[in-house]
Image (cartoon, coloured by chain):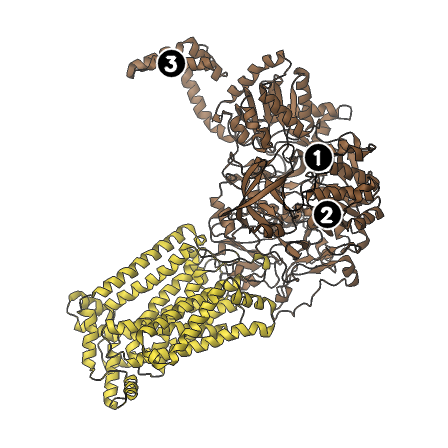
Amino acid sequence: MSASTETEQELARVVEPGVTALAVTAHVSGLVLERRTPLWWWVGFGLAFGLFVLFLAAVGWLFIRGVGIWGIDWPIAWGFAIGNYVWWVGMASGGTLISALFFLTRSDWRSATSRIAETMTVFCVACAGIMPVIHLGRWWYFYWLFPYPNTMALWPQFRSPLHWDFVAILVYVAGSLLFWYVGLLPDFATLRDRARRRWQRIFYGLLALGWQGSSQHWRQFRMLYGLFAALMAPLVCSIHSIVGLDFAGGLTPGWHETQFPPYFVFGAALSGFAVVLMLVIPLRRALELTGVITLRHIDVLARLMLTASLLLSYCYLIEVFMPFYRGEEREITVMTSLLTGYYAPWYWAKIVLNGLVPQLLWIRPLRLNRPLLFLVALCVVIGMWIERYVIVVGSLHRNHSESSWFVFVPTVWDWATLAGSVGLFLTGFFLALRFIPMVSMFELRDLLHKKQAGGGR
Amino acid sequence: MTARKELAERIEGKLAGRSGRSLWRSLDELAREPAVLEMLHAEFPGLPDLAEARVGRRRLLELMGASFALAGLTGCGPGEAAEEATPYVTMPPGLVPGVARHVATAVSRGGYADGVLVVQQMGRPVQLEGNPDHPASLGALDPIIQAGILDLYDPDRSRTVLKAGRAASTNGMLKALVDRLPALAADGGGGLRLLTGTVTSPTLARQVAALKRRFPAMQWHRWEADGRDALRAGALLAFGRPVDTVLHLDRAKTILAIESDFLDGAPGHLHYARDFARRRRAAGEGRPEEMSRLYAIESSPTLAGARADHRFAARPDEIEATVRALAAELGAGPAAWRQDAPGWLAAVARDLSASRGAALVHAGPAQPPAVHALVHAINDALGAPGRTVTYIEPVEADPVDHGDSLKGLVDDMAAGRVDTLLILGANPVFTAPADLDFARALAKVPLSVHLGTAPDETAMLCTWHVPEAHELERWSDLRAFDGTVTIQQPQTRPLWGGWSPHELLAVLDGETRPDGHAIVRATWMERFQGKGDADRLWDDALRLGIVPDSAAAPLSASLLPALSDRLPPPPASTGGGTLTALFRPDPWLRDGRYANLGWLQELPRPFTTLTWDNALLIAPATAERLGLKNEDVVELRSAAGTLRAPVWRLAGHAPDCVTLPFGFGRKVVGRVGHDVGFDAFRLRRLDQLWQLPGVELRKTGETHRLAATQHHQMIDSPDVVRHATLDAFRRDPGFAKRKEPEHSLYPPYEYPRNAWGMAISLDACIGCNACTAACQGENNIAVVGKEEVLRNRQMHWIRIDTWYEGEAAAPDQTLFQPMTCMHCENAPCEVVCPVAATMHDADGLNVMVYNRCVGTRFCSNNCPYKVRRFNYFNYSADDNRLPMSWNPDVSVRARGVMEKCTYCVQRIRNARIAADRENRPIRDGEVKTACQQACPAEAIVFGDLNDPDSAVSRRKASPLDYGVLTDLNTRPRTTYQARLRNPNPEIREV
């Protein structure tokens, strides 16, 4: 047997040989219930929490002083907050795509990674949801965007993309959270049943909502889960389309583009897969999950990332092509400025990081080189933040009114909010690592059962 | 002084080592000592003798009770009541809370009157508007006068008498003055000196004359740093007598402006701007033959230069040579002067003589007397006197050469010949030429009393500083550029007490409780004598804001012969390598007296759009040669000293010279103006007031950030500002029109009542920023400070975009475009606001509901004109201005809220209420926006588009009418009328 066929075979396996359903359940539940909290967790959590405190400080000062602490100015009235929002919500798409879209396609590689991805989604969405609220000049009135009955008989402006966005993000937050929680129910019941300590029994017992594993429960569970998946898969497209419309709905040159909705969906998918990879690669070692998260998973995710990068690069090409094709003077001005002006370094960074670096993944050995893959994913995650930054500020700084042309210079509070939001995400994620099974035990049991019944793949 | 010291030592000795009961006992003993009693009496002259004030226990309790009961009354008004003020026991008929009243008065600028109407709400002045009946205003106002209301309410104003910079009693000051009187009377007032700025007040002149009768040897000195000495000297050269020149731009067809300030600083500039703009608009209004042609030659750019059809940048020495050559060309000078005249000069001379009788030449105050004398000769040769210019007796009372006058004073002070100096409303310690060293001479004056509205540099160095009543708080009178008199009447009781100059002078005249009202009234009762019912004339003058028919009569001044022989020799050419520094007033701070007014600090300077700083202005080519970029700090070295200043490249500046705007760098000033900019006065010398040749610039390697409000000034897309020459317009009257986009799919709005709209004529706009300032005052627009302007967060609702066409180094054209909310029919901001905080209203306004705004700022992003402003911080609350200074008709916006031009919706609503009460439609012209009202050039017209005969509809019917960015189908309600130029075909484009 040649080496390459060996790799072929290795790459075909979604579960390493010898892994049993019982062993998986015992290992995964043991991680939560019994394992002593390892040192790396404490270190990671400590760093994350430090950043989270920074976030609290940044937001606290923001609440005291106002959005003027950021670098936003006139005419660039949107800055980091909006860029961060799009970035976080884009990364959140990774979890939803993997758990909902690939659930619908019945992809067997999904089971082992779905929990990590979904948990990531939940905390990404939390970061994303906060951004547009703190971005408001008067954040304490954020609920005015919601069409609630009120004594003033005032409704929101239903024509505003920001209102659509508010509804979309609200639905997405609710959907992601419920989808995640519903998918956790059988596992919570497992934890409850295997728990030895009293607090664990109460804690997971409450979370399990009285799950008994009866066939009635399973039947309704499957139906609900399928419904959610069917709902979330199109939702992930719609939310990013609407995020795209936040910009395309405006008439600012550089924003007013019909391609923005798919452009944003592709960008979201790219960053989503990248961040899933960044989590899966270290976690499969740290949580000793190499048996169920195999090279095949890594390979599939890498290829998905490459695909998304190609789709996005296509959008980048169109973005450059269209202004010149249309001959629209102001759009050409924006484009020329991006290519050569003040924001050109950022623009070219986004092209390199999102478009060129992922092209390495055409080569299988590179794809399977985990440290390299991790770096590529990191490049993409950074690149995607830069992309949003360039979209937000690059267009505004070359708007219709030449006399207002100016640049955006971020302040220390802009950076603190960005870094702090990473802290918020990591703090949440580390807590989830400690208290939530990071692999869907029941799905793996199911998968192993099917594999055994089918004699392996 | 020594007696005081001795006493203090003795008291200290008596008290030394004592404590407790024995200390108190010895204090008691001390209080009975005659020396102490004497000192107390000197310190508190109003205090009755303790022995006389025998108050029994019962009486004391009664008094205490009464004062306790009456204590609340002190809250009824500030300080000492004006004698004539009566409280509203019965409210005057017609006074409705919330309905403004207008009271006429005048505010001075450099001593000359600008007539204003003070808008009063329940007796509280809230705003200044121009007085349409006043010749210097015609209803318009410049930014400086408008900021007068902020000056009135400036919390940093002087509130108490200061003695050597420390709070002291008014009585002490009075005593010091009165005690000096016998000594002064003894020697005829030889040591008594008076120093003022330019004075046009007849009452002040009368008082000084009266004082001079009492103290024949006293002297009255004048110093105005931003003064017009050169004009006076020029008139003396030409006519042998001082005259003031009044321009008639409405009759001028061909004008030559020699670094002229007729559009921005000259007394009467608002009047001139109106006359000028009317003739410029004529072509667009169907009378192209009336359109005037303006030539300008200047070193430092002026507004007149920006509006010139041909503008020539030249060094100061080149200017004088050119003016000499022009005089020769027109037969007003020897032919020898014609050598090395620039090529264009002959064409200009031909054009000027071709419009003989309708030609006008005017030079600014920074030009030397020789230029002014030549201008008189040229005007004479062009037949201008009596037609485009008239000469009048100088408006300034008892005109003198300010430079000589100040020098005389300083020499006398330094020689110890001055023992009593009264400085009325001037700040010579800051503004006097540095070589005089006024401060050192001042230290030798035993008694110096400074009267000023704020504690300034001079106040700190005088023995006494007396708070001055603001011009809106006192009785006085002033004359305008043409001699018209306005009687200033107080609009409020002095907020912090305060004396008027008349009252202080009256103290010298022996009055202990002077009454400003009586003093001013006495002047006019005397003058009205024999002209009818004097009381009635007085009342009329107060009501109208002018004394009717008080304008100076034109006089005929004839040129003295042999002018060319009497002219000082022309300056040596400074060309080639060496630099000349030009001293020019900052357009808003002038000589620094307005430095504490946030509106003016933050109002963008014309051309540079700089705020909160002055900069060394330099031509781009010269900067290139010296390797200087904007914001580089240079060290300027000269014979007069060195100075560090940041550099700003100014397109259109003459090469080989740099402009140093003065008025900045105040050291003793309120919180707003403290430590802003550099002090150019430090290099100013008496014999080189306006220019300092032979300066060197050395790069320091440091930078100083400068807060400009416009960062991109070269026109890239010609569509925003449309312009053409008069000939091109004649060939193609529709040059400004573009294909309108198709209409929206949405049904149009319907406006059964009014459809408000605005028209802005670029042909008229002179770029003076009066609209921006007026808007700031009317609409309670916050001042944000330099740091915030550096972040481009200024809040002005209307801005003047300044555009250069052609080469950056020497632009062909400077164009001004006031930009404000266009109130689009299809407003891009409205659809993107998620909470519907910005809406279309029933009259077509695009309104902003502050209370509904959550601050997403999408509206600003989506506004193609970028006219929306956001409260990034709580700017209004952070401002230290007095709460009573806000306009009560307009909401003060809080943090996190978007704001923008409302078309002065509060004025529309007021007019609507008035019209509804009278059951009639709103009349055309009844609603004037603040910007429209302030505009001296009538560039802005506002009104109802439903009415085809309204002024705004007529303006919009002009072939020059166009909308900005209409290709976006925004359908703006504010449209522009394109600018026309009237170049001389004989002159090739430079």
- SS assignment at label 1: helix
- SS assignment at label 2: strand
- SS assignment at label 3: helix
Asked whether, in this view, residue B540 is left or right of residue A380, the answer is right
Residue at image point 80% right, 55% down:
B986
Q: Which residue is mark 3?
A: B11
- Name the chain under label 1: B
Q: How many marks?
A: 3
B934 or A280, nearer to the observer: A280
Q: Position of residue B460 (x, y in %)?
A: 51, 28
What residue type is disc 3 on? Ile
Q: Is residue B792 above or below residue A226?
A: above
Asked whether, in this view, residue B610 is left or right of residue B521, the answer is left
* Chain letter of the yellow region: A
How many neighbours does mark 3 have within 10 angstroms: few (below 14), some (14-19), or many (20 or more)? some
Marks 1 and 2 sit apart, C-alpha to C-alpha, by 19 Å
Residue at image point 59% right, 12% down:
B182
Q: Are marks 1 and 2 on the same chain?
A: yes
| Rendered image quadrant of residue A173 | bottom left
Which comes sooner in the sequence, label 1 or label 2? 1
Q: Is residue A156 visible?
A: no
Marks 1 and 3 sit apart, C-alpha to C-alpha, by 59 Å
* Chain letter of the brown region: B
Q: Which residue is mark 2?
A: B296
B624 or A214, nearer to the observer: B624
Q: Is residue A445 above or below residue B768?
A: below
- Name the chain under label 2: B
Q: Are marks 2 and 3 on the same chain?
A: yes
Q: Position of residue B71 (x, y in %)?
A: 46, 26
Question: Which circle, 2 or 3, is nearer the viewer?
Answer: 2
Q: Which residue is mark 1?
A: B230
